[in-house]
């Protein structure tokens, strides 16, 4: 009934195929894929991913390739649009119905036409591709800029003219880093996708349960949420003893959700 997922981003620098295998071995049926190389968005990789038996439920636009999306350079935009096509094709191959991106960082007002307009066009291009394949483009909150609060994130999404593919999601650590209560953030946004990690003092993306977030209240606030409970801690906490730490993560999220739903 409940869908627990773990992000391959947390298992860097392992290969994505190896990360999926370890995630499945810990009990997770689902994973969010963070491609780490261009080879991770090919048909060959899709076949390898499918053989692991772990269902890739969502794909995070790679942080290492962000410059291809949030660019005003014509040639890089063209390369980025090809990559967007490959990314959407990968989702179709894997059956993933969600692509995660972040809001862009706006330039100074006097330079919007030169520096911002092409970036928005790149993002809309990706959103249009998603709409054609019934994929949701999940817009993640960020601690700085347009997505720093629940209201700001919803306003930012509205700026795309009600594009049918673009929907809000919430990352708990990013909310905390913006001095927002993630429980209230969820209450305002009503996310269709979530990234779960903890926060304490200046330490961010801690494994869930190792920081200050009120997890019981957070899960209760999600209410009738039917999406994936996706754990996305920092890879720094999974460089050693990976298998045991993954099993601990599965036990935490499954017990948490089932006791509070």
Image (cartoon, helix red, strand yellow):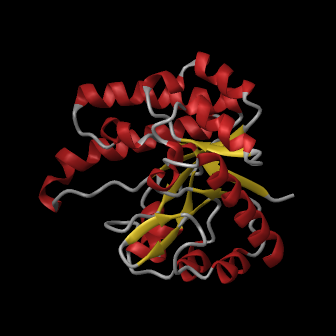
Looking at the image, residue 85 lies above or below residue 13: above
Dividing the picture into quadrants, the one containing residue 57 is top right
Looking at the image, residue 211 lies above or below residue 195: below
**Number of dots carrying numbers:** 0
Q: Residue at x 66, y 44 (%)?
A: 31
Quadrant the C terminus occupies: bottom right
Dividing the picture into quadrants, the one containing residue 77 is top left
Q: Residue at x 60, y 31 (%)?
A: 18
Is residue 155 visible in the rendered image? The answer is no
Dividing the picture into quadrants, the one containing residue 132 is top right
Q: Where is residue 229 drawn, in percent x and y?
A: 68, 60
Q: Residue furthest top?
A: 44
Q: Where is residue 215 drawn, in percent x and y?
A: 64, 77
Which one is in front, 57 or 149? Answer: 57
Q: Is residue 19 left or right of residue 181?
A: right
Which one is in front, 149 or 28? Answer: 28
Q: Residue furthest right?
A: 1
Q: Residue furthest left?
A: 110
Quadrant the N terminus occupies: bottom right
Is residue 11 visible in the rendered image? The answer is yes
Q: Is residue 162 left or right of residue 224?
A: left
Q: Where is residue 104 drawn, in percent x and y?
A: 34, 54
Q: Where is residue 151 drawn, in percent x and y?
A: 46, 76
Q: Is residue 26 left or right of residue 111?
A: right
Q: Residue furthest front?
A: 241
Q: Residue at x 20, y 46 (%)?
A: 115
């Amino acid at each position: 009934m409940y869908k627990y997922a773990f992000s391959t981003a947390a298992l860097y620098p392992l290969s994505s195929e190896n990360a999926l295998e370890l995630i499945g071995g810990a009990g997770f049926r689902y994973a969010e894929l963070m491609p780490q190389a261009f080879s991770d968005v090919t048909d060959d990789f899709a076949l390898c991913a499918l053989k692991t038996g772990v269902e890739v439920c969502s794909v995070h636009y790679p942080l290492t390739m962000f410059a291809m999306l949030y660019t005003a350079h014509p040639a890089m935009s063209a390369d980025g649009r090809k990559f967007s096509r490959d990314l959407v094709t990968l989702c179709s191959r894997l059956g993933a119905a969600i692509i995660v991106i972040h809001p862009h960082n706006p330039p100074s007002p006097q330079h919007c036409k030169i520096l911002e307009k092409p970036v928005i066009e790149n993002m809309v291009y990706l959103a249009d591709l998603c709409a054609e394949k019934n994929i949701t483009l999940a817009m993640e909150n960020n601690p700085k800029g347009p997505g720093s609060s629940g209201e700001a994130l919803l306003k930012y999404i509205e700026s795309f003219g009600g594009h049918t593919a673009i929907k809000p999601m919430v990352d708990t650590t990013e909310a905390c880093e913006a001095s927002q209560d993630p429980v209230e953030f969820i209450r305002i946004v009503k996310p269709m996708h979530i990234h779960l990690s903890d926060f304490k003092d200046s330490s961010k993306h801690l494994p869930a349960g190792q920081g200050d977030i009120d997890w019981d209240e957070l899960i209760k606030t999600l209410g009738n949420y039917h999406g994936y409970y996706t754990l996305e801690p920092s890879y720094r906490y999974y460089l050693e003893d990976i298998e045991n730490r993954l099993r601990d993560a599965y036990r935490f999220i499954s017990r948490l959700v089932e006791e509070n739903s």
